[in-house]
RNA sequence: GGAGGGUUCGCAUAGUGGUCUAGUGCGCAUCCCUGGAAAGGAUGUAUGUCUGAAAGGGCAUCGAGGGUUCAAAUCCCUCACCCUCCGCCA
């Protein structure tokens, strides 16, 4: 959510942003509603003031006639007031619906574009491996080594279901453990295991709702299963004033993630790339409300995840996402894409974005600045790791005999450097 | 699932329809007193929003949202959360 004052004063800038992000929202209608809202507030407040004043007189009135007269007067006022209050409620409701749809403004450095296809490569890391044998996909490799079971996954959990098994299970555990260790010991992040079943408010606060309901699983109690630990982690300080001295707050959050993949039925139907349920380690940062701080941490979070990929020896590239690929609240987003040998393509494994105060305004996370003013903190997040990176690591580490060489950082946790058929 | 109790200004607590613009204590800030400090005293102590060039002023906020009333922290309804007990289950 943006500040209504800012919207009023920067109408054209916002309209341009909605075009860039391909979002349909009527800013003129919003401003019209805001005018109505303000004039109704003025009028209602005036009547309330009169009521308050007269009520004081009624309280102390000794004379019964005077008292009755004043009460009758107030009964009339009340009827008028209720009419205006009803109208005000309607206006505010409509106002809020549009307010939640107004997008954040993309940074100058964001390329214009319609979507993913217009993302621009920023840099590449690592050499694309050459194989002197027919390579297999992670599905074949892992099935051969009994690391995963998709058939029974589908039997038990339905479409896109899977079991991780043997070294498949251990390798995932190693990945999470290694990642969290690194963020805690080397980077000073606070580790958290966060809820995946989350109430509506933090979803609205982070910008996933109201517009994205069909992408989420919903419980019969009205909670939603979140697709990322970002939601619960951002909700942690919802409706709180945090101590300025505690900023920046850096969380490394682990959670199961659930995605309906409602719009992608035909896509990536094989393997672990697109699944309904997976685990993720996520970086979340709250920092002081300055653009420079946000940019600094954005680059930092990107670097952190690049280090992880380099540790895993996975070739990747960084792309800057085009305006059409940005979410409602995102100012700028980098994706990291790992090289997938079986597809001969880079595929998204990380998504690193900053929001300025878009999320914290919705979530009401503030701090008191040195000048005594309350400010909304800035927020950012980036994937630290998911199993998607493992797909790439496995395919890149495959050997002619079907075994897999494991990156050193994981071998340490797994207890072996090579996974092979017994 | 059932029964009961609770949610008040940073903390603790008072407050069952109109002098509550929410009292008191603690804490915190500034000042007085002091050589300095403690004790004591004085003053102050939130957020949001509207209006205004500003100073200032209005309005709202006693878990949330509705309702009753001329008037609600106080009465009624719905919901959320916390506590105690019972049941069921891990």
Image (cartoon, coloured by chain):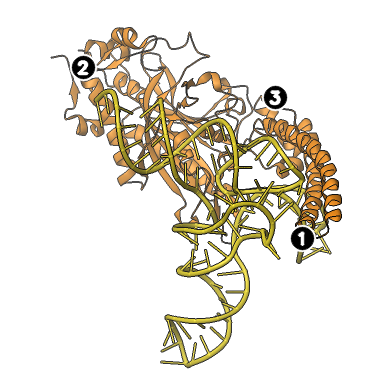
- Residue A395: which numbered mark, if any? none
> Is residue A176 placed above or below A399 in the rendered structure?
below
**Which of labels 1 and 3 is toward the front?**
1
Query: Quick one: SS at disc 2?
Result: loop
Q: Quadrant of the N terminus of chain A?
A: top right
Report crowding for label 2: few under 14, some 14 to 19, many 20 or more residues within 10 A (C-alpha): some
Q: Earlier in the sequence, mark 2 or mark 3?
A: 3
- Residue A60: which numbered mark, if any? 1
The reply to whether dot 1 and dot 3 touch (C-beta < 8 Å) is no
Left or right, residue A204 beside residue A103 = left
Q: Quarter-wise, where is residue A6 in the image?
A: top right
What colour is chain B?
A: yellow
Left or right, residue B20 beside residue B1 = right
**Image spot of residue A93 (x, y percent):** 70, 32
The reply to whether dot 2 and dot 1 touch (C-beta < 8 Å) is no
The answer to whether one can see residue A35 in this image is yes
What colour is chain A?
A: orange
User: Could you give the CA–CA distance between mark 2 and mark 1, rounded to whole angstroms?
Assistant: 91 Å
**Image spot of residue B8 (x, y percent):** 53, 53
Left or right, residue B50 beside residue A302 = right
Return the residue at label 3.
A24
Residues tagged by mark 1 and mark 3 found on one chain of the structure:
yes
Report crowding for label 3: few under 14, some 14 to 19, many 20 or more residues within 10 A (C-alpha): few
**Image spot of residue A20 (x, y percent):** 67, 28
Q: Tell me the chain of label 2.
A: A
Residue beneath the point at 61% across and 25% down: A324
Return the residue at label 2.
A403
Residues tagged by mark 2 and mark 3 found on one chain of the structure:
yes
Query: Quick one: SS at disc 3?
Result: loop
């Amino acid at each position: 959510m943006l500040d209504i004052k800012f919207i009023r004063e920067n109408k054209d800038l916002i309209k341009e942003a909605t075009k860039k992000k391909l979002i349909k929202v009527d800013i003129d209608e919003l401003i019209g509603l805001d005018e109505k809202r303000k004039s109704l507030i003025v009028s209602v407040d005036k009547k309330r003031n009169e009521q308050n004043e007269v009520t004081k007189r009624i309280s102390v009135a000794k004379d019964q006639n005077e008292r009755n007269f004043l009460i009758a007067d107030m009964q009339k006022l009340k009827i008028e007031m209720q009419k205006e209050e009803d109208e005000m409620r309607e206006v505010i409701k409509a106002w809020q619906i549009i307010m939640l749809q107004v997008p954040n403004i993309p940074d100058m450095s964001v390329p214009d574009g319609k979507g993913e296809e217009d993302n621009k490569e920023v840099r590449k890391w690592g050499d694309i491996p050459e194989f002197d044998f027919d390579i297999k996909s992670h599905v074949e490799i892992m099935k051969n080594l009994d690391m995963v079971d998709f058939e029974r996954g589908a039997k038990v959990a339905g479409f896109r279901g899977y079991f991780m098994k043997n070294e498949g299970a251990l390798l995932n555990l190693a990945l999470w453990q290694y990642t969290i260790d690194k963020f805690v010991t080397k980077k000073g992040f606070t580790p958290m295991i966060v809820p995946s079943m989350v109430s509506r408010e933090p979803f609205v606060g982070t910008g996933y709702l109201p517009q994205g309901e069909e992408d989420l699983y919903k419980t019969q109690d009205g909670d939603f299963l979140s697709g990322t630990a970002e939601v619960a982690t951002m909700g942690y300080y919802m409706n709180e004033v945090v101590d300025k001295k505690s900023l920046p707050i850096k969380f490394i959050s682990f959670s199961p993630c659930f995605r309906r993949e409602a719009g992608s039925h035909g896509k990536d139907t094989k393997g672990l790339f697109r699944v309904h349920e997976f685990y993720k380690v996520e970086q979340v940062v709250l920092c002081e409300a300055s653009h420079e701080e946000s940019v600094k941490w954005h680059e930092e979070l990107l670097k952190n995840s690049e280090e992880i990929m380099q540790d895993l020896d996975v070739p990747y590239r960084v792309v800057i996402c085009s305006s059409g690929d940005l979410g409602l609240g995102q100012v700028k987003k980098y994706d990291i894409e790992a090289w997938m040998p079986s597809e001969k393509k880079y595929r998204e494994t990380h998504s690193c974005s900053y929001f300025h105060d878009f999320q914290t305004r919705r979530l009401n996370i503030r701090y008191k600045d040195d000048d005594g003013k309350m400010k909304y903190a800035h927020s950012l997040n980036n994937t630290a790791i998911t199993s998607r990176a493992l797909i790439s690591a496995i395919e890149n580490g495959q050997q002619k005999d079907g075994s897999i060489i494991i990156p050193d950082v994981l071998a340490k946790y797994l207890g072996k450097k090579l996974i092979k058929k017994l």
